[in-house]
Amino acid sequence: MSKENIMNTYGRVDVVFKEGNGCKIWDVNNKEYLDFVSGIATNCLGHSSLVVLDAISRQSKKLMHISNLYWSDTQMELAKKLASLSHHERVFFCNSGAEAIECALKLARKYGKIKNKNKDKILYMKNSFHGRTLGALSVTGQKSYQKDFMPLIPNTIEIEFNNIDDLKENFNDSVCGIILEPIQGEGGIINVNNEYLKTARDLCNKYDALLIFDEVQCGIGRIGTLFAYESFSVVPDVICMAKGLGGGFPIGAVLGKEDIVEAFVPGDHGSTFGGNPLACAVSLAVLNEITTNNILDNVKEQGEYICNKLNKLKEKYSIIEDIKGQGLLLGIKVSVDTKEFVKKAFEKGLLLAGAGQNVVRILPPLNVKQKDIDEALILIEEVLKEF
Ligand SMILES: *Cc1c(COP(=O)(O)O)cnc(C)c1O
């Protein structure tokens, strides 16, 4: 196998995977790993989930793709399902997280322009992550990702996450939208504070701007509620989703309030693959599974279980500074090099991911069983002993 033909954009771990089942995954040398990364919060029902496999098999034999020149039954059904489960009415489908962000940014700009031609500023958070396209990068508050791609989209303004004064100072009538992750994922598993959110909601109401939640990582059951916003005290105008939405199959979506998304008219936005019948059928099956099979209860239960165990480890090992997160979006804040931590875990057969400067992310599938968690905790303790 040759790696030479792949563009050099990722710092990858030196392993080639070939097969997975549930929480387990095997490399080409048949070494087994416990996968607590889940394709970065994407394979929410584990590898080779029968729910996903069955939906792919059923729908791929019927209709995979038709473009958005026409209507499809599965797209309408999925939209209806998302609307029925949320406080929102309308959906735009795309294929990834960054694409969902692009749609939300364009919606905010169009919404603003209808009110007044100078209403075009978008506020975003320091330390945030919204994806790699130029639009998403323009609202990603990490200089290391932005610096080589300047100039980015103008009138995007970075503010301090959870700093109410900074929010108030930068909010005015020229703002058309504000975007934030209810829990910053890549940035290091950092929760938004409720008071901050309420202020953001009030300011959006006062100045008629859109409150956009990026739930790409923390949504779709990851923190114990189907939508992340249900775990907080406000309802956003627009929600961006992807990752877990397809259970490993690529799909993204933007969910919005009726009176807001009517800013978009035919021709304003589109995606050839977006909302194709196959992706929608898979996503519908995934959502049905999450909302009817006690998966959300499992997320809360197992999340608390891991947290308790990790907090016990924290008392025993001084390199653990904090246990962060909610549900199954968890992080261990450590005083050592997280790359080293992740590497040691990998060598022992446990997949974990880094986040921010000093957090090790734990993202098992939402249907993870306690015995898999126990196995992971043993390996984590072995890693801790080595520091
Ligand atoms: C992963 C991620 C994105 C980008 O999603 P892609 O599918 O990689 O484009 C955007 N926002 C958040 C919060 C993410 O975690």
Image (cartoon, helix red, strand yellow):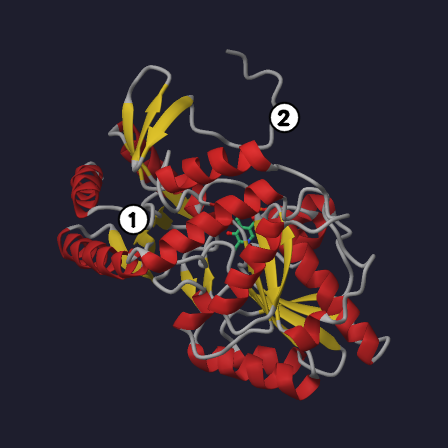
Residue sitting at x 81%, y 60%: 266
Locate residue 288, reporting x and y percent. 41, 54
In the image, 239: left or right of 175? left
In the image, 18: left or right of 158? left
Q: Amino acid at mark 2?
A: Met
In the image, 117: left or right of 216? right
User: Looking at the image, is 91 positioned above or below residue 172?
Assistant: above
Q: Residue furthest bottom?
A: 206
Say whether residue 378 is visible: yes
**Disc 2 designates what residue?**
7
Mark 1 or mark 2, earlier in chain = 2
**Disc 1 designates what residue?**
367
Residue sitting at x 17%, y 37%: 382
User: Looking at the image, is 260 positioned above or below residue 97?
Assistant: below
Locate residue 158, reporting x and y percent. 64, 66
Does any atom of ligand 1 lie closer than 8 Å to the CB of label 1?
A: no
Locate residue 329, reporting x and y percent. 36, 55
The alpha-carbon separation of the residues under discs 1 and 2 comes to 34 Å
Mark carried by residue 113: none
- Judging depth in this view, the residue of 344 and 263 nearest the camera is 263
Q: Residues within 10 Å of mark 1 (few under 14, many from 20)?
A: many
User: Looking at the image, is 9 positioned above or below residue 186?
Assistant: above
**Helix, strand or loop under label 2:** loop
User: Looking at the image, is 360 positioned above or below residue 182?
Assistant: above
Residue sitting at x 42%, y 40%: 52
- Judging depth in this view, the residue of 223 and 89 nearest the camera is 89
